[in-house]
Image (tube, grey):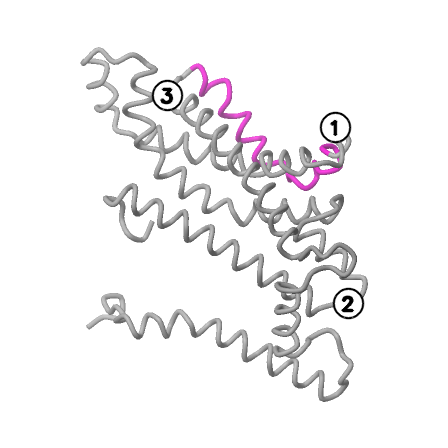
Amino acid sequence: MRLINRRPDRPAAVFLAALPFAAVFIAYWIGSEIRLSANPSDKLLPAPETIAATARQLFTEGDRRTGEILLWSDTWASLRRLGAGVGIAAALATSLGVLIGMLPYARRTLSDFVAVLSMVPPLALLPILFIVFGLGETSKVVLIVVGITPFITRDLSQRVLDIPHEEIVKAQTLGASTAVIAMRVVLPKIIPRLIQSVRLSLGAAWLFLIAAEAVAADAGLGYRIFLVRRYLAMDIILTYVIWITLLAFLIDWALKATSRAAFPWLEEGL
């Protein structure tokens, strides 16, 4: 049997999925042991048990001054900004994608503009956003919106263009207006793709969020990482990085599960 036709069974699939994570952990553990054996006070690669102890402390112990558990407050602040930014971006991208994909006049007007906007490095706009919107929550949310909206818009507009023209013609033959076609034909086709596009944009959204929080914030996961970096507190930094990664994975998993539940006819790999 050719290798391309071989598929792992369930135990083998679980083992193969865990293998890269185990390899990374073992590589880190070996590197940490080497550095700590040469210098027990080395801070660059803290031992895994040190990171675990720090994580327990961060998740359970409150701040000495306020009594607030900072990791949870940072998590809430970051998720609030991320949710607002991604939600606004998804709504804008859906509207623009439908307009560009359905209406030739809108496509001629906005398609090239969105394409050029998608080439602008969003982080280069960060100082401008802080000047225009201030150092509060608005600038951080706007950075996420500016960063991921063009990508989602281009993806959705192409999905609209990929809808078989026969379906649009049939709807018009039955007397459907442009608005009805948009609501009853186009939107059901692109909502599954919207979820996939949001999933693909989450990594960039986290990047923009962490960058904005690092520059100007008084709470948030990115703010805390850049606050403790001056003390070389790698155990705290790594705990936050692992926590951010876990949050991103859980959000992605929730979106994937939602897509499968709402649109069971989609292929499993999407």
Q: Secondary structure at mark 3?
A: helix
Q: Is residue 167 left or right of residue 190?
A: left
Q: Quadrant of residue 243?
A: bottom right
- Considering only vertical position in the picture, is 93 above or below 43? above
Q: Is residue 147 left or right of residue 191?
A: right
Q: Which residue is mark 1?
A: 132
Q: Position of residue 38 (x, y in %)?
A: 75, 88
Q: Range of the magenta residues?
A: 105-129
At label 2, which amino acid type do we have?
Answer: Leu
- Considering only vertical position in the picture, is 226 above or below 106? below
- Tell me if residue 251 is in the magenta stretch: no
User: Secondary structure of the magenta portion, mostly?
Assistant: helix
At label 1, which amino acid type do we have?
Answer: Val
Q: Which residue is mark 2?
A: 232
- Tell me if residue 112 is in the magenta stretch: yes
Q: Which residue is mark 3?
A: 102
Q: Position of residue 75 (x, y in %)?
A: 61, 52
The CA distance from mark 2 to mark 1 is 33 Å
Q: Upstream in the sequence, badge 1 or badge 3?
A: 3
At label 3, which amino acid type do we have?
Answer: Met
Front in this rendered view, residue 38 or 63: 63
Q: Secondary structure at mark 1?
A: helix
CB contact under 8 Å: marks 1 and 3: no
Q: Position of residue 241 (x, y in %)?
A: 61, 61
Q: Position of residue 208 (x, y in %)?
A: 63, 45
Front in this rendered view, residue 183 or 117: 183
Mark 2 closeness class: few <14, some 14–19, many ≥20 residues within 10 Å: few
